[in-house]
């Protein structure tokens, strides 16, 4: 359980994640305090994902439905739907610090305390490293940072994004500036990360605090070459 008295909101976007959601929730819940919360936004899952979440009967877990309309954009940008789903979760967050989480990763046991011990008045956002694993949990790469050459350089992160949402935590001030998301936003993590750079200090921490799972049903393209043109990102 975390040692800090600050309230944490873990925000997660889900869709048909029955295969991995329990392992992920189990890795998160025991790290949280009684006043913390997990906000999970569901984009219309048709499998047993929501049933698994409800079965926890934990008052810290809030399951909300993503009722936003994509207006046909799913034909162009799958990531647009993911960003929209995360925005719905973030709108319900009430914590002092927000942690983003994917439905299929695994948090390392010391993630929450490790990051909370680093936050200070001017440090607005932290990005930590991750071990990249496959569907079975076998290591693909020992470091996501090494794959992306992750660093805090504003122009570099427009061209090749270093901000991986599931490895990010930020304070409420960043959240208030990030919402609502701009129209047509695809990379919600890049948007939040670069806002953090403008609002205060951002730290890239080389601790590997999650197992970041990549498989055929992964919703985002993080770690792969972006298909968006530079002018669109700008």
Image (cartoon, rainbow, N blue to C red):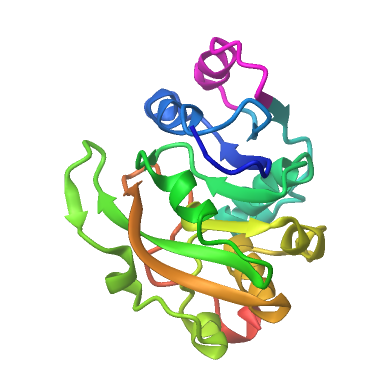
Q: Residue at x 65, y 33 (%)?
A: 36
Q: Nearer the viewer, residue 71 or 57?
A: 57
Q: Residue at x 33, y 44 (%)?
A: 216
Q: Which residues are magenta?
A: 45-62
Single out the residue that lies furthest toward the bottom. 155
Which quadrant of the view contains residue 57? top right
Residue 76 on image: x %, y %: 60, 60
- Please determine whether, in this image, residue 211 is positioned above or below residue 175: above
Residue 181 shown in magenta: no
Residue 133 on image: x %, y %: 25, 48
Residue 173 shows in the view:
yes
Residue 6 on image: x %, y %: 67, 44
In the rendered structure, the answer to whether residue 64 lies left or right of residue 54 reads right
Q: Nearer the viewer, residue 208 or 71?
A: 208
- Please determine whether, in this image, residue 14 is positioned above or below residue 58: below
In the rendered structure, the answer to whether residue 143 lies left or right of residue 71 reads left
Residue 227 shows in the view:
no
């Amino acid at each position: 359980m975390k040692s800090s008295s600050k309230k944490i909101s873990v925000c997660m976007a889900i869709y048909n994640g029955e295969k991995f959601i329990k392992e992920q929730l189990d890795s998160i819940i025991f790290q949280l305090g009684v006043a913390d919360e997990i906000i999970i936004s569901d984009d219309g899952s048709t499998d047993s994902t929501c049933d698994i979440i409800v079965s926890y009967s934990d008052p810290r877990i809030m399951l909300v439905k993503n009722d936003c309309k994509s207006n046909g954009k799913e034909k162009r940008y799958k990531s647009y739907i993911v960003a929209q789903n995360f925005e719905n979760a973030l709108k319900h967050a009430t914590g002092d610090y927000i942690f983003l989480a994917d439905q299929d990763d695994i948090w390392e046991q010391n993630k929450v305390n490790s990051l909370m011990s680093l936050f200070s008045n001017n440090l607005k956002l932290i990005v930590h490293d991750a071990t990249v694993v496959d569907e079975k949990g076998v290591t693909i790469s020992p470091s996501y940072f090494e794959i992306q050459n992750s660093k805090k350089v504003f122009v570099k992160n427009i061209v090749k994004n270093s901000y991986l949402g599931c490895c990010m935590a930020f304070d409420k001030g960043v959240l208030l500036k990030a919402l609502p998301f701009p129209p047509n936003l695809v990379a919600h993590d890049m948007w939040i990360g670069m806002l953090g750079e403008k609002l205060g200090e951002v730290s890239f921490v080389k601790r590997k605090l999650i197992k970041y799972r990549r498989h055929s049903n992964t919703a985002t393209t993080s770690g792969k070459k972006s298909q968006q043109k530079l002018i669109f990102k700008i």
